[in-house]
Image (spheres, coloured by chain):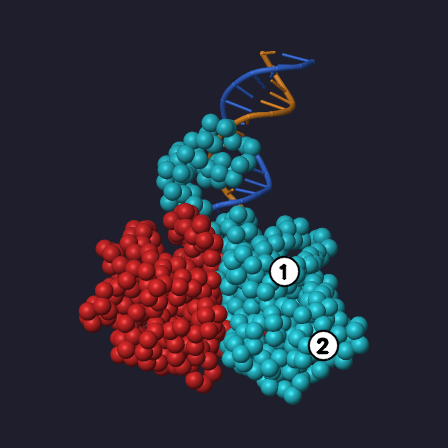
Chain colours: A cyan, B red, C blue, D orange
DNA sequence: CGCATTCTCCAAACCGCTTTGGATGCGGGA
DNA sequence: TCCCGCATCCAAAGCGGTTTGGAGAATGCG
């Protein structure tokens, strides 16, 4: 059932039916009701493609999942972010289109999505330092919002991020206040922006207490269970092992927990752990009492908000780039405690 | 840059340019090369919406993520499945559109996606018993492939699934052969099709050895870390606790591992564990030696294959429904061992 | 050389919707 | 009574492609 047929069945012109359905005033109220009723009865939905061809708006937002060709990993927080963004899109009548691409062809995909008119805007995931995607998107003139930031980007852009530096600074201070001096950092890949900021917060806190950061206690890898495990194993085997760990995500924290258990170390007593918690729906940090002391911020909420921001930018393309910076809260759980007197084991 | 402009810049008609780019034979080879070169130089990409309006094909596939309104959880295996499917779509020039909806409005979304012509086909995720989506999609005539199956569906349909019943039957047999008699099942929600089949494989194996399934050893819940933990805690507190567990996913298996550690039970010695392993990219089951003995099947590979199947169905809509049934392999890891003589603890 | 093909290319219709620019009929003010 | 303005509706021109139905030139054949 298309517009023309619906109009014919009502003895009206397509023009009038279109206007009736889209709420234009040039149509008698009685007629409008008749049209709406008929549309409902016939299960009429305007064809998306025709509509967006006519209006010039795709009513769709693109999300590009980059797969680095070496480590073919899907970002585990991606699903929850998408879920949040999806809620916003659904309310606003937008569709979400997803592309999974290796980073080699990422630039091409952006150009494509824009040139083919598939989407009205884009959410940029997992920004890296000096991320080339930002100048690229600015150049081709496709509205976008970055989830995170990109250190060293010169063009202004819109973003939503948490205060990674400050939250890891606070977490490190928290551990220092508990008497820990050998504090390890299990962080994300070193070129990821969030990892850079977290490390700088960590280093800053150490330096403020006159502690030189020890490269042997700083690990950069992917946010997998295995990475958390092996990083912890290696560090615990050092002659002077850490008494506390700072971890960038619940997933490696779980691997770290495994390593601790294997070493007969009790979390919160022998070794303290603080992790960042994205509040992934399938990985809650305990039910009532948090298992891990954690810097916490809902990535799903971030998805909702970033999507909202992008829709507003699309609605008013002229206005200046906006940004939102959230503070992560520090939830004290059972994984932290005073530094042991003589070190673990 | 659109077709008309490109044509004008070449002194050709839009017809000829379109044909040249789409490989039709009615155009001189020399002209074709000239057109292709110009298209490349001007970064020309045909407008998706106009193209699909003209051809009637959306060149897009829909994935609907159902969020049950009570537990607002994102299926953790979803991201990897999507990544696999995305690879197939990218190769075939299809886009992927995602909708996140509460199950209350799922039916409406399917009708919408079809009526608005947004997609050419749909992948159905997380099928339940007697899943209403299957007759619905069949009725509205939208091609679809189910990832999994739906027990009790009367209309024929295409699907790709693993042999859940057999793999859990084999896993249970494996534990029985090791001497275990009190074997617990930590399964998915009882109305999920995969959970039903896994339970039936488990029950079947027990019955074949003359063991009556004990409802107290059968847990049905969501595939979260917390569920695995609390189910294990509860069962281990029984007067006659299980000596072995069968778990439906790595994520609750990790929660289960936490419960075991808390109870000072060594996995593989005091308590045996077999889990299903979807090979999630961020949750590898150990590096060389698998940590968990596991029934294993790549959900990402499933995504690739299901997408492929759907594209073939769209290309040849008349042909009979197809189906693929994969056997999961049983990987023996370190989490299983002979039943302890007198039970744990 | 004449005619039928074959090669190339083009004009125009169409996909389903929006939107501009009227057309028509009615009531009200001068 | 006449004209104007308003309310209501419609015809037709896009949006950017594909595709049908030729047209004109070059080629093949007798």
In space, the residues marked 1 and 2 are separated at their CA atoms by 21 Å
Q: Can the viewer see residue B172 in this picture?
A: yes
Of circles 1 and 2, which is in front? 2
Q: Residue B78's spot in the image, x, y percent?
A: 44, 64
Residue shown at 43% from the left, 74% from the top: B265
- Name the secondary structure under disc 1: strand
Q: Nearer the viewer, residue A331 or A265?
A: A265
Would residue A295 appear left or right of A35 to someone viewing this image?
right
Q: Please, which chain is the residue tagged with disc 2 on?
A: A
Q: Residues within 10 Å of mark 1 (few under 14, many from 20)?
A: some
Q: Residue D9's spot in the image, x, y percent?
A: 48, 32
Q: Nearer the viewer, residue A139 or A153?
A: A153
Q: Please, which chain is the residue tagged with disc 1 on?
A: A
Q: Nearer the viewer, residue A235 or B111?
A: A235
Query: Residue farthest to the bottom?
Result: A239
For mark 1, what is the residue? A331
Residue shown at 24% from the left, 59% from the top: B156
- First reached walking from the N terminus: tag 1 or tag 2: 2
The answer to whether residue B107 is above or below residue A112 is above
Q: Residue B106's spot in the image, x, y percent?
A: 40, 50
The circle on residue A181 is: 2
Determine contact: label 1, label 2, CB under 8 Å: no
The answer to whether residue B214 is above or below residue B29 is above
Same-subunit check for callouts 1 and 2:
yes
Q: Residue B254's spot in the image, x, y percent?
A: 46, 70
């Amino acid at each position: 059932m298309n517009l023309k047929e619906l109009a014919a069945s009502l003895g009206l012109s397509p023009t009038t039916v279109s206007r009736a359905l889209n709420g234009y005033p040039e149509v008698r109220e009685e007629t409008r009701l008749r049209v709406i009723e008929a549309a409902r009865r016939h299960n009429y939905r305007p064809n998306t493609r025709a509509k967006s061809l006519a209006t010039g708006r795709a009513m769709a937002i693109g999300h590009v999942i980059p797969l680095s060709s070496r480590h073919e990993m899907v970002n585990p927080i991606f699903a929850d972010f998408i879920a949040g963004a999806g809620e916003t899109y659904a309310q606003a009548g937008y569709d979400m289109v997803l592309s999974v691409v290796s980073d080699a062809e990422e630039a091409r995909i952006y150009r494509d999505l824009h040139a083919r008119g598939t989407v009205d805007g884009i959410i940029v995931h997992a920004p890296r330092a000096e991320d080339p995607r930002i100048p690229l998107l600015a150049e081709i003139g496709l509205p976008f919002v970055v989830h995170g930031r990109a250190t060293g980007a010169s063009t202004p852009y819109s973003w939503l991020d948490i205060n990674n530096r400050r939250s890891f600074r606070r977490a490190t201070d928290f551990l220092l206040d508990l008497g820990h001096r050998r504090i390890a950092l299990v962080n994300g890949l070193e070129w990821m922006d969030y990892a850079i900021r977290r490390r700088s917060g960590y280093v800053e806190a150490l330096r403020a207490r006159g502690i030189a950061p020890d490269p042997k206690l700083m690990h950069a890898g992917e946010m997998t269970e295995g990475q958390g495990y092996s990083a912890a194993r290696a560090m615990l085997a050092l002659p002077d092992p850490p008494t506390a760990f700072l971890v960038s995500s619940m997933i490696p924290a779980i691997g770290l927990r495994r390593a601790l258990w294997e070493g007969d170390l009790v979390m919160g007593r022998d070794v303290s752990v603080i992790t960042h918690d994205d509040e992934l729906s399938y990985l809650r940090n305990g039910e009532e009492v948090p298992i891990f002391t954690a810097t916490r911020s809902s990535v799903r909420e971030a998805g909702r908000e970033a999507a909202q921001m992008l829709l507003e930018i699309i609605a008013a393309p002229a206005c200046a780039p906006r940004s939102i910076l959230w503070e992560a809260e520090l939830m004290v759980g059972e994984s932290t405690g005073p530094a042991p007197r003589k070190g673990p084991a």
